[in-house]
């Protein structure tokens, strides 16, 4: 996906020493954290807090899939591109790509499927909100 494509949200992540493994590459599980941050900024941190405290609704991951093509490393600044879509009244699918400036292809791609639950962890319909 292109960063200037309609609906695509861009979030930048600086890679620090704590993000890497012994080889100096970003530890694979950290990409899930970067995707989470990107989604939070896309949907709006204030809106997510409001949903949680006022409507007793929170997002949880239903399914996650990642493909690793090339490593990022210490000192890199990455661009996390996110495009969300509502696939049903109950599910949202977020497409993520990790880009480093100057690369011709995404380093990592991922699809994260989300659902919403209430305070008792019971499935509830997705709220109406921007981003998907």
Image (cartoon, rainbow, N blue to C red):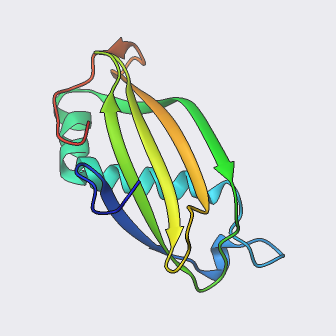
Apparent side of residue 129 relative to residue 42 in the rendered image (left or right) = left
Quarter of the rendering occupied by the C terminus: top left
**Residue name at image x 64 percent, y 71 percent:** 19
**Residue name at image x 65 percent, y 82 percent:** 74
Apparent side of residue 104 relative to residue 115 in the rendered image (left or right) = right
Apparent side of residue 17 relative to residue 85 in the rendered image (left or right) = right
Q: Nearer the viewer, residue 105 or 42?
A: 105
Q: Is residue 108 above or below residue 102?
A: above
Q: Nearer the viewer, residue 20 or 83?
A: 83
State the residue lying farthest toward the bottom: 75
Q: Nearer the viewer, residue 62 or 104?
A: 104
Q: Is residue 64 above or below residue 67?
A: above
Displayed quadrant of residue 29: bottom right
Locate residue 109, reporting x and y percent. Answer: 57, 50
**Residue name at image x 25 percent, y 52 percent:** 45
Apparent side of residue 18 relative to residue 125 in the rendered image (left or right) = right
Locate residue 7, reporting x and y percent. Answer: 24, 48
State the residue lying farthest toward the front: 104
Locate residue 23, reporting x and y percent. Answer: 83, 76
Q: How many marks?
A: 0
**Residue name at image x 44 percent, y 62 percent:** 80
State the residue lying farthest toward the right: 22
Q: Is residue 85 above or below residue 123?
A: below
């Amino acid at each position: 996906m292109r960063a200037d494509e309609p609906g695509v949200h861009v979030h930048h992540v600086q890679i620090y020493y704590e993000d890497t493994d012994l080889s100096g590459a970003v530890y694979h599980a950290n990409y899930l954290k970067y995707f989470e941050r990107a989604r939070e900024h896309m949907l709006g941190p204030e809106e997510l807090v409001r949903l949680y405290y006022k409507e007793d609704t929170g997002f949880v991951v239903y399914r996650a899939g990642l493909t690793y093509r090339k490593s990022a490393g210490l000192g890199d600044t990455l661009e996390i591109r996110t495009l969300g879509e509502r696939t049903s009244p109950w599910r949202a699918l977020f497409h993520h790509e990790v880009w480093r400036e100057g690369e011709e292809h995404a380093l990592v791609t991922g699809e994260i499927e989300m659902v919403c639950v209430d305070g008792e962890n019971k499935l509830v319909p997705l709220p109406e909100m921007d981003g998907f």
